[in-house]
Image: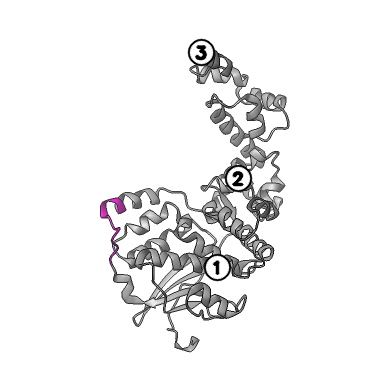
Amino acid sequence: MSSELPAVQLDSPKPCAVSPFVRALTLSCFEEFTLSQGLNPAEMLRRASLPVELLRRQEGILAYRRFCALLELCTWQSANPLFGLQYGLHQGVSIFGPLLYLIRNARTVGDALIELKENFALHNAAAHVSLAVEDGVAVLSYHVYERDMPGIGQAEELAIGVGMQLMRTLVGGNWLPSAILLRHAPLTDPTVYRRTLACNPTFNTACHGLVFPAAVLAQPLGSANETLHQLLTAHVHNMERLSADEMPSFVRQLLRNMLPSGRVTIDKVADCMAINSRTLQRRLAQEGKSFQDLLDETRQIMACEHLEDPLISTAQMADLLGYSDLSAFCRAFQRWFSMTPREWQKRHCPEHQPRLLRRLRVLR
């Protein structure tokens, strides 16, 4: 069968910086799918050295290597060799978040896939999407930059599942590709693939991808809205790309995710990013930052945010910022702002009253 496939010239993967990242949206529907597989989602995340808070913060980031390791762990624990593929089919287009609105408001299927290709780095910096056309045949393919990592086969099959659901969203629910290309050997009996995908994949190919008639690309999208598409294009262009040069911002996001769970160290953050702490220190130094700088900055911002919420007590703030006790938090706050948390709240949020006074007013 592979000899019948078109010899389409595909994009070559570009060199990628150390430890590429993906958005926490990559974990879309993780809880419900792992539960359906008899797994504890929080336990799986902890065992993969990922903060459980990523499930609540879709704008967060995680190392793709950690994500692949998570899929591998879930595969073994569920005894389901097609965990990644079935998870991708379950996720579908939910994995794209805001990018989905841009895709669905393009004029045609082809325009939508070009939007996906050009903006994929907003969602995933560990791979790129390619769209090639030759002799009336189109190939939508998925290329991971770093292929030597545990769980990569599961992650690539997840991408195939997501791609299938995206095409069904754009073309119609009964859409099937002419061929499904999988770079690796079967992970289980090929007949299980056919039951899952409703067609036989071709294994050991040059890339992961979906093959279909190029005429599909010209199909107009019923959901297209040119005005909305222009607005979404402007919005997407202002969104932050997942660039390895933005190491400080990645660390800040991880700190926001991890601090509510307790004390956070550079070793814990580096482990979550799938790099060693010395590499993290060096990369931050290149950007003129230190881990302690970022930890203090993040805690200061979060402290001010919490102080604006009258329902959060000072003791709760200390816990949410990863301090061992209230006095440690108060000393740090005094060092940052030369005043106590209560004094800051009175100065910046005078309308906030202690909860006891609010309750007395309600009783009256």
Q: Which residues are magenta?
A: 220-229
Question: Is 265 on the left or on the right of 192, as rendered?
Answer: right
Q: Residue at x 69, y 41 (%)?
A: 264
Count of numbered circles in the view: 3
Q: Which residue is mark 3?
A: 361
Q: Nearer the viewer, residue 118 or 178?
A: 178
Q: Residue 85: give its label.
A: 1
Give the secondary structure at mark 2.
Answer: helix
Q: Which residue is mark 2?
A: 53
The type of residue carrying mark 2 is Glu
* Residue 351: image location, x then y, percent: 48, 17
**Residue 255 falls in image quadrant:** top right
Q: State whether residue 28 is above or below residue 9.
A: above
Give the secondary structure at mark 3.
Answer: helix
**Residue 355 falls in image quadrant:** top right
Q: CA distance from mark 1 to mark 2?
A: 24 Å
Q: Nearer the viewer, residue 13 or 117?
A: 117
